[in-house]
Amino acid sequence: MYWLKAKNKKIASFIVILGLIGSIGAMSTLKRSSEDTEASTQNRMIFWKAGINMAVRNPLFGVGYEGYIPNLLRYANGNVGTDGTKMTIHSTWLLALAETGFVGFFLYMAIITCPYPFVVILPSSFQRILLELTFRTISSHF
């Protein structure tokens, strides 16, 4: 987008190419081994299951605000993977469910979804922007 609006295409092209080379260089330093990826996936599954267990065993109000990490060992059946109790659940949705129970989770969902019936009264340009913001907000929570 920047390149299309630039007045000096040579400098803009140089900046874009430099950015691409820098990105490729940065990505090459971030390689992870398959064992590390496997361990990360397993830990995430353990944390998600613990969060669901917290919600199921404390359905109304969950384990309380910032109660996920202190209760992790109990609800993960003592198995917290290689990361121990330093990590969180990595999912805003499941964290809200675990810490606030189903009542808090439905309120959390209401905060996100209640504005959408009012979209129909907005001009079409605002509708598109709101829908795009919604998609980005929801996808950033996973």
Image: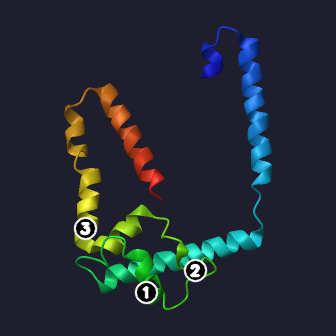
Callouts 1 and 2 close, C-beta under 8 Å: no
Front residue of this view, candidates 8 and 131: 8
Q: What is the spatial separation of the Cα atoms under label 3 and label 1, in whole angstroms?
A: 19 Å
Vertical position of residue 82 compared to residue 6: above or below: below
State the mark number for residue 104.
3
Residue 37 in the image: x percent, y percent? 69, 69
- Residue 24 placement, left or right of 91: right
Give, as a three-letter code, the residue at label 3.
Gly
Residue 85 in the image: x percent, y percent? 53, 79
Give, as a three-letter code, the residue at label 1.
Tyr
Give, as a three-letter code, the residue at label 2.
Gly
Vertical position of residue 56 compared to residue 113: above or below: below
State the mark number for residue 84.
2
- Residue position for label 1: 75
Residue name at image x 43 percent, y 89 percent: 74
Of circles 3 and 2, which is in front?
A: 2
Front residue of this view, candidates 66 and 111: 66
Residue 41 in the image: x percent, y percent? 62, 72
